[in-house]
Amino acid sequence: MSTPLFTERRRCCHVFYTISFSENRPQSADKALGSARGNPAERTYLFTSESVSEGHPDKLADRISDTVLDRFLRSDPSAKVACETFIADNLVEVAGEFRTSPPELFITISKEIPDLVRQVIRDTGYNSTFSGIDLDTCEIRLQLN
């Protein structure tokens, strides 16, 4: 029988969830698994997850990466895309590896990425330096391969 323990900690727009539980199994089951450490009849598991609120920079970065991915797949459904976005004060950096067929499509879409980034920032509601990023003046860096 499992005994769940649920805890919640809040810290600057992040919510961390930790769930831990112990599982009791007969020793014969652990012998079959080849367990040789500690008390094989009792195991403790720890599961941790993080959640952030709407408009948080982590969610904004994910939306930008998803928008870039969608743009590539809309033009080339077989494109290979590994995209990550990093955000700091008034800076957005989009990095990743991209393979398209034809290869020239990569160059065309790469030129569109700064406009895509600014549109996502606008749609999310960031519209001034008050929010830490100004969509009209923020620096957008691209590190694309």
Image: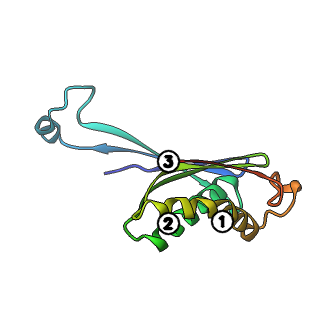
Residue 82 vs 101, above or below: the answer is above
Going by the numbered disc 1, the residue's amino acid type is Leu
Q: Secondary structure at mark 2?
A: helix
State the residue in front, 118 or 28: 118
State the residue in front, 79 or 10: 79
- Label 2 vs label 3: CA separation? 14 Å
> Would you name the residue on which mark 1 appears?
116
- Are there few (<14), some (14-19), or many (20+) residues within 10 Å of tag 2? many
**Which residue is drawn at the image coordinates 19% and 26% (left, top)?**
36
Residue 118 vs 144, above or below: the answer is below
Going by the numbered disc 2, the residue's amino acid type is Phe
Tell me where residue 51 appears, x and y as whole percent.
59, 55
Q: Secondary structure at mark 1?
A: helix
Visible residue check, residue 52: no
Q: Quadrant of residue 60?
A: bottom right
Q: Quadrant of residue 102?
A: bottom left
Tell me where residue 106 appears, x and y as whole percent.
50, 60
> Would you name the residue on which mark 2 appears?
72
- Label 1 vs label 3: CA separation? 18 Å
Tell me where residue 117 appears, x and y as whole percent.
68, 61
Q: Secondary structure at mark 3?
A: loop
